[in-house]
Amino acid sequence: MRILIVGAGAVGTVLATTLGGSHDIVLGSRRGPMQVHGAFPLSRRSARADAAVVTTRALDDVAEGHWDAVILTGAVSETEDVVAHISAAHPAPLFGTVSQVPSEIRRLRSLVGAERLVVLAPGFLAVRGESSAGTGYWVPPRSPLVTVSGAGAGTVRTWFTQAGTRAKVGELRDILAQAALTMPFMAELTILGGDWDRLARQPGRALAGAREARAAVGAPIRVAPPTWTVGLALRAVPTLVPFDFRTYAAEHFARQRRQTETLLEDWIEAGSATTPVLAELLVESRTTT
């Protein structure tokens, strides 16, 4: 299979490396041709020295090619021109996105049609090291690298299976519900200046936001856990991840602030007047420097 992965960041590098052993993978980037070190699982640190070199190509050049699938790892709005061009030139490809933002998924569906749309929810955390170190990624035990939904989900799952990587087929509703559960906490984290320990001490507002977000996507939390148990769970996370999770979370979600705000906007719109906590988080996110 010829698969174009759009975006040479950490997520794109992990997908390109894991699929590259069994498929013809091209990593397309707006920054043009360059070489980046590939990805390695952090559970096997000895693989760091063996991380393959991945060559990226200019996105404008690869848009002219014939692809069996195109996977977007950035905002759909940033690559609409490429999607429209490939979709018009080659009616067969599947188009995937790792975005879990409802409005972005709807936008991609409008560009390529529901029958060609797949959503890939990453089940891993990826952290890019120095230029010579590659990208390390960690998948929680017994979890898939990605969960895939859409008409072509079974096909995409097979691609990962052929490459020796675990993937599963899921419902889009469940993918959106998972984002609705976790991302209000990341919005609060950004408002708190990236202080994970402070988030763990005061998770109440984020939990209330998660309840509103889950209701907005049609997957309400029937029985909310006590706030103190949520705090315990948050404090445990950095002890489970095999890298400096506190620094990673602070930096990653600061960079992703705009995407988080778009998620909040989507949930507020879907939830009508029943999202006061999400509205509060959105206002504070926009005004926090």
Image (tube, rainbow, N blue to C red):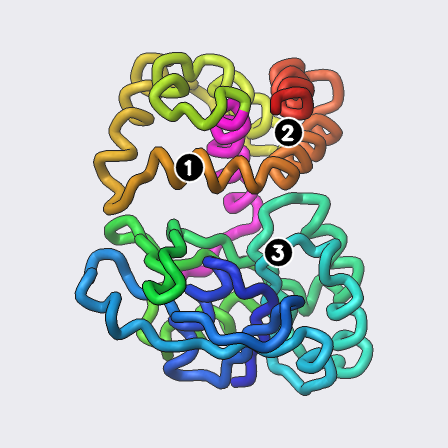
Question: What's the residue at 56%, 29% (across, down)?
Answer: 214
Q: In the figure, residue 161 lies in which quadrant?
A: bottom left
Is residue 137 found left or right of 81 in the rendered image?
A: left
Image marks 1 and 3: residues in contact by CB distance under 8 Å: no
Sequence order check, earlier mark of 1 and 3: 3
* Residue kind at label 3, given as amino acid type: Gly
Q: Residue at x 24, y 46 (%)?
A: 242
Q: Which residue is mark 1?
A: 249
- In the structure shown, which secondary structural element does the residue marked by tag 1 occupy? helix
72 displayed left or right of 271: left
Graded by Cα atoms within 10 Å as few (under 14), some (14 to 19) or many (20 or more), the crowding at tag 3 reads some
* Mark 2 crowdedness (10 Å alpha carbons): few <14, some 14-19, many ≥20: many
Q: Which residue is mark 2?
A: 216
User: Principal SS element in the magenta part?
Assistant: helix
State the residue position of label 3: 74
Callout 3: SS = loop
Q: Position of residue 5 (x, y in %)?
A: 57, 70
- x and y percentages locating residue 130 in the rendered image: 37, 58
Q: Is residue 30 magenta?
A: no
Q: Nearer the viewer, mark 2 or mark 3?
A: 3
Compared to 13, does 207 lie above or below?
above
Which one is closest to the eye, mark 1 or mark 2?
Answer: 1
Q: Nearer the viewer, residue 270 or 136?
A: 136
Residue type, mark 1 in image: Ala
| Residue numbers of the magenta segment | 167-190
- Residue type at mark 2 is Ala
How far is the residue under mark 1 from the one under mark 2?
A: 25 Å
